[in-house]
Amino acid sequence: MSETLATSDIVLSGLVLFGILQLAWFSVMLLRRGAPPETIQQALPPLFSIWILMWPVYIDASWLWVGLGSLLAFSLTAMSLKKPFFQHLRVAWSPLTENQNLGLKQRPLLMPLTHTMTALLIAGLWFQAIPEFGFGLALCFCIAFPAAYWVDQIATRRFNHRTLGFPAHPEQTLAGHITLIVVSTALLCWALHVYHGTAWQALLIATLIAAMMTSATRALFPGRWNGAAAMLSTGFVMWLL
């Protein structure tokens, strides 16, 4: 029986590794066809959510680190190798602020996907300690944050909505923050419901407060570190509640 359980975790880890290989290839192909790195990076977290949905299926949660280790290995390889594929991958997975006006042969300031890996690492640590919290937090990072970003883009470019004027994130809009709160509340509720079967109505107040903390963290923390900061602050609020 134990061998069967171990095999299931190995199979899941193999699927995750294959998925990361596919993401790396698609990222490079999109970059070579003119897609901006910012667009590629915002498209990655929703795809990572496919892996996040596997987290409750793991028998031994320590296998979860295989996925993070694979991402780290790809990022280190992209920084180290001079092959055109990995140089393009490095640009596709590095923040725009570190790539503007830089050629492919110049190094970005941070390792590719640093912010994403840090946020997932924190969510993974929560998952090890309190699975329902880590599961919900990881889903919020992979789904709610990109949703808020795209709502901000649409609100400002198509509907000329005013931004909120936060110094750390001047492009954020009220529509984006409402989206983040609503989506995060739903995801946190669902994660708790999956593990405990609790009625949604009993979870709304606590998860709404936690989601508001997520939105506040996104507004106040600079750059993309707000995702990792939100994993800490939102998890702590949920723990208190």
Image (tube, rainbow, N blue to C red):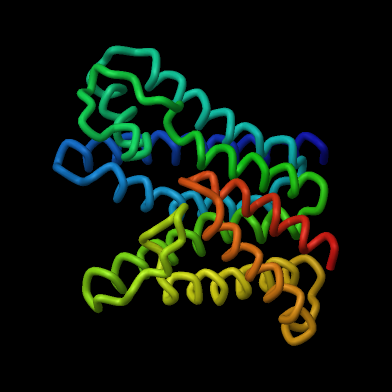
On the image, which quarter does residue 204 sit in? Answer: bottom right
Q: Which quadrant: the N terminus?
A: top right
Q: Count of labels shown?
A: 0
Question: What residue is at 17 percent from the left and 36 percent from the top?
Answer: 32
Residue at the farthest left position: 33
Nearest the viewer among 153 and 161 is 161
Question: What residue is at 33 percent from the left and 74 percent from the top?
Answer: 162
Residue at the farthest right position: 240
Nearest the viewer among 227 and 222 is 222
**Coordinates of residue 205 in the picture (x, y in percent):** 74, 81
Q: Is residue 57 above or below residue 181?
A: above
Question: What residue is at 52 percent from the left and 60 percent from the top?
Answer: 219
**Coordinates of residue 69 in the picture (x, y in percent):** 58, 28
Question: What residue is at 68 percent from the left and 76 percent from the top?
Answer: 208
Q: Is residue 88 above or below residue 151?
A: above
Q: Which quadrant: the C terminus?
A: bottom right
Nearest the viewer among 35 and 193 is 35
Left or right: 173, with 189 as reference point: left
On the image, which quarter does residue 193 sit in? Answer: bottom right
Nearest the viewer among 20 and 124 is 124
Q: Is residue 14 above or below residue 220?
A: above
Left or right: 8, with 198 as reference point: left
**Coordinates of residue 178 in the picture (x, y in percent):** 50, 76
**Coordinates of residue 14 in the picture (x, y in percent):** 54, 35
Q: Is residue 231 above or below residue 117?
A: below
